[in-house]
Amino acid sequence: MSRTVRWGVLATGGIAATFTADLQAMPDAEVVAVASRTDASANAFAERFGIPRAYGSWAGLVADEEVDVVYVATPHSAHREAAALALEAGKHVLCEKAFTINEREARELVKLARDRGLFLMEAMWTYCNPVIRRMTELVRDGAIGEIRTVQADFGFAGDFGAGHRLRDPALGGGALLDLGVYPVSFAQLLLGEPDRVQADALLSPEGVDLNTGMLLGWESGANALLSCSLVGHHPTAATVIGTAGRIDFPEGFFYPRHFVLHRAGQEPEEITSGPGPQGLSGMQFEAAEVMRAVRAGETESPLVPLDGSLAVMRTLDAVRERIGVRYPVDGLVS
């Protein structure tokens, strides 16, 4: 493959716009096509970003011979359908998080990608962030000793009416898959898949979670206290507590620019990633990892391994089971 990787963007919402803007600032990436379910939406997005081709169907995008990688930016209720369509057409795929609605759908995508020898990655941009990567290096090297507790939260209060997608079980509504995936992924990045899952939640009249607390436990004795909410303003903070110190992310832990390292007997140390490119959201780091892997002929990223994404989906499934949230697709058998 040439140095420039050619992208197709599947969907035209806010996250697609943010990712496209980051891609277009990268010298080795080119956005060559966009698709929506309607011509009007696809054409408007293409005009906004100067994209040469617009398709009013997903099928048109995945059939485009000039597209190397498809970025799936639909709501997660459509992730499996959209990503599978791209993989079946022979395209590499970066799929937004939560990876799918449930672990069964995620397994189906992973099997399809592996059977076809194609690259597939969940768009967990947090894992690709250089500050997070530095944090994991310090933890691995014993900077704070053995991890005992991880705390993380993500929530905001919004005016989500009964017709909003976040209140619709058919669309995978609720706080957990939109927001809770971040605290869960953060904890599992450090500790792996938990051995025990406990949870409690406030549910909407439609049966999706509005405010959820999770307690994950590991046989090592470590635990994670996590929360997500659509009805409360959270600091989106995280703390990793070890036997010899702790690491604090005071805000925005899922796209951090710094953290504070506290070691026993030493002054706190602030660690940053440097200024970075101006005007970019931070999604360029996951895009760079996708392009590195695709050029190298790799079918998954060591930073965001597929088995890790499957493990996160199993935990999210377990949380939903504990709090009584069930989506219509959960009962389907492929």
Image (cartoon, rainbow, N blue to C red):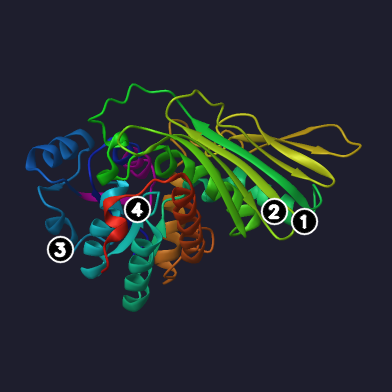
Q: Amino acid at mark 2?
A: Glu
Numbered disc in front, either 4 or 2: 4
Q: In the picture, which quadrant includes the C terminus?
A: bottom left
**Number of numbered markers:** 4
Residue at the spot 69% in from the left edge and 35% down from the top edge? 248
Numbered disc in front, either 3 or 4: 4
Label pair 1/2, CB-CB below 8 angstroms: yes
Q: Secondary structure at mark 4?
A: loop
Residue linked to disc 1:
141
Distance of label 3 from label 1 (alpha carbons): 46 Å
Marked residue nearer the N-terminal end (4 or 1): 4
In the foreground, 58 or 30:
58
Q: Amino acid at mark 4?
A: Ile
Q: Disc number at residue 101?
A: 4
Distance of label 3 from label 4 (alpha carbons): 25 Å
Q: Start and end of the magenta stretch?
A: 19-33
Label pair 3/4, CB-CB below 8 angstroms: no
Residue 297 picture location, percent across and down: 41, 72
Marked residue nearer the N-terminal end (3 or 4): 3
Q: Is residue 54 left or right of residue 256?
A: left
Residue 229 picture location, percent across and down: 47, 32
Q: Amino acid at mark 3?
A: Ala
Q: Amino acid at mark 1?
A: Asp
Distance of label 3 from label 2 (alpha carbons): 41 Å
